[in-house]
Amino acid sequence: MQDRMAARWRLPAAASLAIVGFLSGAQAGTFDTRVLDQNGSIKLDSIMPLLSKTPPLYEQVSARLRAARRTADAIDCSGARFPGSWTHLGAYRVAPYICAIGGETLTISADVRVSDAEGDSYVRPTAAAMRYAKTFSEHNLRWTWQRIEPQFGRRAPAASAVTLESQAFKREVTSAEPAYIGRWAGELAWCSNDPQKTDAVPQIFSARSRTGYESECRFHQVSGTGTKWIIAEECTGEGERWKSRSELSISGDLMRITERSGSRTGVYKLHRCPAQASGATGRRS
């Protein structure tokens, strides 16, 4: 019984970011990351190498950090995030980014190119893009600074459309992400496997879904905190559809899953894959 459940996921042997009008400078043929419809937190120091390629922006950020007596690793930002349905890029952060530094909010946009191993690029989140894209690059950075009202913790009233976005950003960076987000595999060796060559590949967990080899689950209810989570989900794969209730227990880089579907129960363990996927140029956190 457990083997049947594990086979759905190829388990171990048992087992909105929305920025109104800000992307108008993007070049034709680039990937519009607004269609990803997810965002996630990321530290400023993770994107400083990208900013260093645009000296005026890097210098402005460095100057504001000095004025605020802060370091880049202490600044929380928000970025667009590739959902778990992207086989190789799931959970990576990508422009646009929003960072609050001192009394200002910095918004950074870029032209994003999403490519597969052969160098072919994708401009839309098609099934082929989600399965084969392995890298992305960010070019032509554009940015704006917006003052924040210190006494209210929000931007000046003159920019009401952007103020709503700032509030969404604040909610994002002050709430911890579920510990299960990321890439998890039955064996660590699977983390670098190519899904075009084997079905022994990682599961990719986002906040509201998980995907495996030819299987996907959408989370309808999530409860828990820290390292303990209970998830009610509806799954599809290999011509089947089923509902299950999964209990996740995380200890360091090991996750134990107890999955119940009807009268069947499966228990298995997954290992967290290293953060840097092969060939990817972006950032996860």
Image (tube, rainbow, N blue to C red):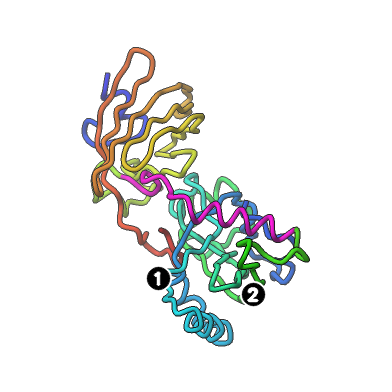
User: Does 23 lie within the magenta span?
Assistant: no
Q: Is residue 37 left or right of residue 222?
A: right
Pick the residue in front: 72 or 232: 72
Residue 262 in the image: above or below residue 248: above
Q: Is residue 149 left or right of residue 134?
A: right
Q: Residue 255: where, in percent of width, then height?
A: 27, 40
Q: Secondary structure at mark 2?
A: strand
Q: Secondary structure at mark 1?
A: helix
Residue at mark 1: 73
Quadrant where the N terminus sits is top left
Residue type at the position of mark 1 = Asp
Q: Which residues, given as a range, are shown in magenta?
A: 161-184
* Mark pair 2, 1: CA separation: 20 Å
Q: Residues within 10 Å of mark 2 (few under 14, many from 20)?
A: some
Pick the residue in front: 229 or 102: 102
Mark toward the start of the polypeptide (2 vs 1): 1
Q: Residue 141: where, in percent of width, then height?
A: 61, 75
Residue type at the position of mark 2 = Trp
Residue at mark 2: 143
Q: Residue 270: where, in percent of width, then height?
A: 27, 41
